[in-house]
Amino acid sequence: MSERKVPHVVIVGGGFGGLWAARGLAGAPVRVTLIDRCNHHLFQPLLYQVATAGLSSPDIAAPLRHILRRQANVTVLMDEVEHVDADGKAVALAHGGRLDYDWLVLATGARHAYFGRDEWAEHAPGLKTLDDALAIRRRILAAFERAEAENDAAARRAWLTFVVIGGGPTGVELAGTLAEIARHTLRREFRNADPSHARVMLVEAGPRILSALPESLSAKAQRQLEKLGVEVQTGRAVTAIDATGVELGGERIATRTALWAAGVAASPLGRELGVAVDRAGRVAVAPDLSVPGHGEIFVVGDLASVASDGKPVPGVAPAAKQMGAHAARAIRARLAGRDTTAFRYADAGSLATIGRMAAVADLGRIKLSGLAAWWFWLFIHIFFLIGFRSRLIVLINWAWSYWTYQRHARIIVGTPKSPS
């Protein structure tokens, strides 16, 4: 069979959804082209660990070519899709050129959303990529350095004030880890500024943090954060952010380090399809994850809006993996002339870590908090990391941090973009 007669599957995005779709087509009578703007797959649930100097970039990322090196029917392209011609069954690439497809899987994920206040992005960066994590790490570590060099007490307090906006898992993880860094990791390392005096605030506009979890676990998470020294502010919306502070209604908090974890919007590529999208830009897909009117296109992960058993499928890594695998099965079914089935999400529960020996876990009938939840969280994240090296390195680093409170990745590279 010549190559031009082999059906071509184009997968856009090398995250959980795209990678699991590509793996699901191993051995299928198709040629697969996986396109991503980066050359690596990122284990995003541990991205905050890179941002807070607990892990290095290679610990949670692996080259896509290496991951798929044994899958002979996959070609990896480091590029970006700028346009989808759904009628012409082709995608246009940023570096020029056009790829025709027989099947298309869109798995381009989500980006930061500032609720119409995009100017806040400069002063309150979000956390979605390795570049984001390294920039945030630089900003955090540089703030302590600037506080050490500052003679004015008010200015020093501003450098030692950290405001995390958004009480979801990312915000909770960032705030808890920042408190541990200030009170334990940096202890006795500075002479003029005392890091233990740092003020860490977690601001949530809703009535409670971790709103996706049961109220009892949300309350326990808040108590654990407060025990670490985090000030949790719920029911307070941010009204302004600039280079020197954050405003909560009529109150202004002087800070040089604000971090955004409050909202996301789907990749703009979904709007290219000319079909219905929700307020977050997610594509309203059919039950089998295909696009209405274009059965050859599948949308998975954070870009898809779909329900399973009457409930919206959450934008989490396990859901993206399951969607990617389902899209691959659907393509195999179509190739074999069979009907596709509706996507069913197997919800294994929700987890959020707060700090050393502190976490919460909702496993359906079983609900954990504190040390038990922390051990469960640790095991799950080690288990799902890709590659033996990553699992081993992360385990060693976490063991070292557990016994010493130290974080090995505290190197500032590049020029901090924090205001002078």
Image (cartoon, rainbow, N blue to C red):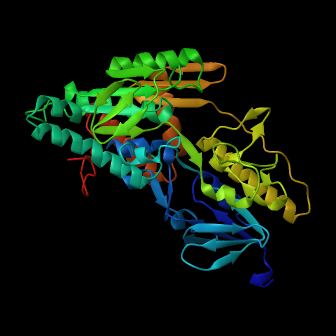
* Residue in the foreground of this view, choosing between 387 and 144: 144
Quadrant of the frame with the N terminus: bottom right
* Residue in the foreground of this view, choosing between 359 and 287: 287
Tell me: 249 left or right of 252: right
- Image spot of residue 165 (x, y percent): 43, 33
- Image spot of residue 41 (x, y percent): 52, 57
In which image quadrant can residue 158 be found?
Answer: top left
Tell me: 344 left or right of 371: right
- Looking at this rendering, what residue extends furthest in the front direction? 250
Question: Can residue 370 be seen in the rendering of this structure?
Answer: no
Q: Is residue 172 above or below residue 137?
A: above
- Looking at this rendering, what residue extends furthest in the bottom direction? 2
Tell me: 256 left or right of 151: right
Residue at left offset 75%, top offset 57%: 298
In which image quadrant can residue 18 be found?
Answer: bottom right
Question: Can residue 163 be seen in the rendering of this structure?
Answer: yes
Residue at left offset 30%, top offset 42%: 243
- Image spot of residue 147 (x, y percent): 16, 37
* Residue in the foreground of this view, choosing between 120 and 169: 120
Please tell me how many numbered marks the rendered image carries.
0
Q: Is residue 387 above or below residue 262?
A: below
Tell me: 254 left or right of 172: left
Residue at left offset 62%, top offset 30%: 349
